[in-house]
Image (cartoon, rainbow, N blue to C red):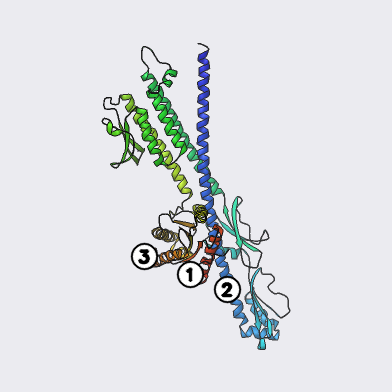
């Protein structure tokens, strides 16, 4: 017997170390998963920000090229320029180019005077009887000054940057961001120039590590408290239930299915298994109520919130006066757990303590589930508007297209982009701009059905996913939303009212057969709406 004691002690130590390792492993797994969710959320937000910057910078680049083309046409129509080209008056042309180094002229058959400009607009000058006199070339220098103008127009976020590259070579200064993510788009049609937007990865990594650290500590503390409470209660109940004259062996107690300690262990195990299987607080409530009945030997139990019964187990109507314990932590009150004893045997002091302890552990489990759900919700929700974010929208779009294809339904996609939103921020400030975004999000929520999805796709661009809706239905909803926004009134910092409009592009399945085709068709329609004057709804042709 003396030899068995050290062996038993070593066995208990090994079990304790195994449990500690399991607790650490579970905490690390929860922390890693939470960090992964946060990383994906931050990455999606950064990508959406970069895409929005590129879209706005491209629009500004088109204006730059349009201005260069307009200048070339004005010079080509000038009698002085036409006369100088007709007479081959190089000195007269030099006087014009001296005033603007971005302007050059070429005689018929001569060398290209704008060869030094990667971006340019040229206009032919014709004389009497259609005779070619030469060309006027206006270039757009590609340098830091251009990038600064594009960055200002696009509202590039602090810490992000833009650059122009050609065949992998930087034509402008390379951004001073070592660990970075990037996104690129053609700078102008017909050229090898690419506009690249950069964002640092450091804030994403820092946010991810902070989330993992906080979730790891919270999970570790929760599991440690559950383990400590389970150990304390079972030891206490073992001691209380053993007769003083003939102590029962622990193995006997484990075999007794009616012992309080056995019931307590089973209740804890049931709650623990439910918490491991789901992080839905509503799914945990029935398990908690049933565990309370099993742990205390009650005839039934009810969970009551604000006077209304939410969950019941057993036969509470057949029991005596209930024991009431509170579920919830802090201000997050879930309800009152009413546990009913047998009519002929009220709860003793030990069973009362057990009920309160079980309620405390259940409250911790519910809070842990609530926090887990909150982290998951943050990963798929836009912080500013409360709408679905780009990540959730992308996932839902693929699922809805698959569902429509499988069951032969329809699906409409509406893209919306607030018109001249940069001017709102420039004239009224970003705080007022945020109010506009939130108000438009509210209008979207008021316009859609419960199973529709409203999302902020990035920046001032939004999206609506409308299952069981064809192109006509999507157009009607977009028109209603456009009217509602036109009627909305916003107030600037000086107290003056102003209005905002939006452009809409839409497409529908089965006209577009895939998620990619839907997005492309709707985006093309949105681009046409912008090009045709904004503040309008355009249907896409749904062709890839």
Q: Quadrant of residue 194?
A: bottom right
Query: Where residue 249 sits in the image (x, y, percent)?
Result: 43, 16
Closer to the camera in the image, 459 or 148: 459
Q: Which mark is residue 534?
A: 1
Q: Earlier in the sequence, mark 1 or mark 3?
A: 3
* Badge 2 element: helix
CA–CA distance in space, label 1 to label 3: 26 Å
Q: First in sequence: mark 2 or mark 3?
A: 2
* Above or below, 300 relative to 372: above
Give the percent coordinates (x, y) of residue 227: 44, 29
**Quadrant showing the C terminus:** bottom right
Quadrant hosting residue 199: bottom right
Q: Which mark is residue 67?
A: 2
Q: Position of residue 132 (x, y in %)?
A: 68, 83
Q: Are marks 2 and 3 in contact (CB under 8 Å)?
A: no
State the image coordinates of residue 53 (x, y, percent, origin top left). Answer: 54, 60
């Amino acid at each position: 017997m003396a030899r068995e004691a050290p062996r038993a002690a070593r066995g208990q130590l090994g079990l304790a170390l195994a449990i500690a390792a399991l607790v650490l492993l579970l905490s690390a797994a929860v922390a890693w998963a939470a960090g992964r969710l946060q990383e994906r959320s931050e990455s999606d937000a950064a990508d959406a920000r970069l895409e929005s910057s590129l879209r706005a910078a491209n629009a500004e680049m088109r204006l730059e090229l349009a201005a260069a083309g307009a200048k070339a046409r004005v010079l080509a129509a000038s009698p002085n320029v036409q006369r100088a080209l007709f007479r081959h008056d190089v000195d007269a042309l030099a006087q014009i180019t001296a005033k603007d180094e971005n302007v050059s002229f070429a005689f018929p058959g001569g060398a290209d005077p704008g060869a030094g400009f990667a971006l340019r607009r040229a206009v032919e000058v014709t004389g009497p009887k259609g005779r070619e006199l030469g060309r006027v070339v206006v270039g757009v220098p590609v340098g830091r000054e251009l990038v600064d103008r594009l960055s200002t127009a696009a509202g590039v976020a602090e810490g992000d940057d833009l650059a122009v590259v050609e065949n992998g070579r930087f034509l402008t200064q390379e951004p001073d961001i070592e660990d970075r993510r990037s996104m690129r788009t053609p700078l102008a049609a017909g050229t090898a120039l690419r506009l690249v937007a950069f964002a640092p990865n450091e804030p994403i990594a820092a946010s991810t590590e902070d989330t993992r650290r906080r979730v790891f500590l919270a999970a570790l503390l929760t599991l440690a408290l559950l383990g400590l409470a389970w150990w304390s209660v079972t030891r206490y109940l073992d001691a209380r239930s053993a007769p003083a004259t003939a102590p029962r062996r622990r193995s006997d107690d484990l075999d007794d299915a009616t012992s309080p300690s056995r019931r307590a262990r089973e209740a804890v195990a049931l709650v623990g298994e439910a918490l491991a299987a789901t992080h839905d607080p509503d799914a945990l409530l029935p398990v908690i109520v049933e565990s309370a009945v099993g742990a205390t030997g009650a005839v039934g139990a009810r969970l009551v919130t604000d006077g209304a019964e939410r969950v019941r187990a057993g036969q509470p109507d057949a029991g005596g006066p209930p024991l009431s314990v509170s579920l919830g932590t802090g201000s997050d009150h879930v309800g009152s757990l009413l546990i009913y004893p047998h009519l002929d045997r009220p709860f003793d002091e030990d069973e009362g303590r057990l009920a309160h302890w079980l309620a405390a552990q259940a409250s911790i489990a519910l809070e842990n589930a609530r926090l887990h759900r909150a982290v998951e919700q943050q990963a798929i929700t836009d912080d500013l508007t409360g709408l679905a974010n780009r990540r959730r929208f992308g996932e839902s779009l693929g699922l809805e297209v698959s569902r429509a294809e499988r069951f032969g339904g329809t699906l409409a996609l509406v893209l919306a982009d607030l018109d001249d939103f940069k001017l709102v921020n420039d004239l009224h400030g970003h705080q007022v701009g945020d109010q506009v975004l939130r108000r438009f999000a509210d209008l979207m929520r008021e316009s859609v059905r419960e199973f529709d999805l409203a999302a902020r796709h990035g920046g001032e661009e939004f999206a609506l996913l409308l299952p069981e809706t064809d192109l006509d239905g999507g157009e009607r909803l977009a028109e209603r939303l456009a009217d509602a926004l036109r009627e909305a009134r916003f107030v600037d910092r000086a107290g003056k009212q102003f209005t905002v409009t939006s452009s809409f592009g839409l497409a529908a399945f089965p006209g577009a057969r895939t998620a990619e085709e839907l997005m492309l068709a709707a985006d093309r329609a949105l681009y046409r709406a912008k090009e045709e004057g904004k503040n309008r709804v355009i249907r896409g042709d749904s062709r890839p």
